[in-house]
Image: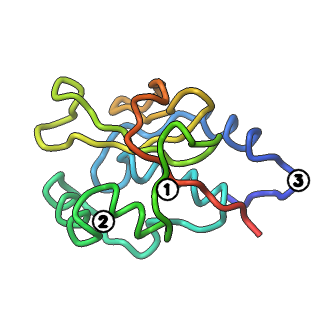
Amino acid sequence: MTTSPTISRPRRLTDFLAQPPAPFAWAAANCCHWAAAWVAQATGADPMAGLPETATAAAARRLVKRLGGDLRAAWSKQLGREPIAPLLAQLGDVVLVQLSPEQQLEEGVGELVGICAGALIAVATAQGHVAYLPLSAGVCAWRLEAQA
């Protein structure tokens, strides 16, 4: 989707969050795909462009390992910047969340990325909905640069 410079980021984020994400699928609809779609819309740069498809949790872990070892390192590499403290996140920034064992989709998948929605983090659920967590649940965040 092409962004219009006349539409503000808050409006674009509101519109993005109003569209339900696809139900979870490792290959094309996981938290990284969802957050990357927002980044592409907000900045014009897709942080997942050129990355291979990951059809399983094991394939996703291998890709993350290749990109730096964990989601924090992988997103830092793909966005080209270091993370900031989560409570410094601004509207539309990407936020990393650490899940408790009971929140994990499957064993060994303990992190997810979401989008700062003010004092909350919007996250895509496995069922294809948007859920909200307090910003304090974030581990770190990445500031997005505006599209030129």
Which residue was labeled with disc 3? 6
Rendered location of residue 108, percent (x, y) = 13, 43
* Front residue (pair 28, 57): 57
Task: Mark 3: give few (<14), some (14-19) or many (20+) Cα within 10 Å.
Answer: few
Q: CA distance from mark 3 to mark 2?
A: 34 Å
* Front residue (pair 105, 27): 105
Q: Considering the numbered disc 2 on the image, is that residue within a helix, a strand or a loop? A: loop
**In the rendered structure, which disc, 3 or 2, sits on the residue that comes first in sequence?**
3
Q: Mark on residue 36?
A: 1
> Amino acid type of disc 2?
Glu
Q: In the figure, residue 109 lies in which quadrant?
A: top left
Q: Considering the numbered disc 1 on the image, is that residue within a helix, a strand or a loop? A: helix
Task: Mark 1: give few (<14), some (14-19) or many (20+) Cα within 10 Å.
Answer: many
Q: Mark on residue 53?
A: 2
Q: Quick check: marks 3 and 2 in contact, CB under 8 Å? A: no
**In the rendered structure, which disc, 2 or 1, sits on the residue that comes first in sequence?**
1
**In the rendered structure, which disc, 3 or 1, sits on the residue that comes first in sequence?**
3
> Amino acid type of disc 3?
Thr
Q: In this rendering, is residue 71 above or below 48?
A: above
| Eye-nearest disc, 2 or 1 | 1
Name the side, left or right, on which 88 lies relative to 70. Answer: right
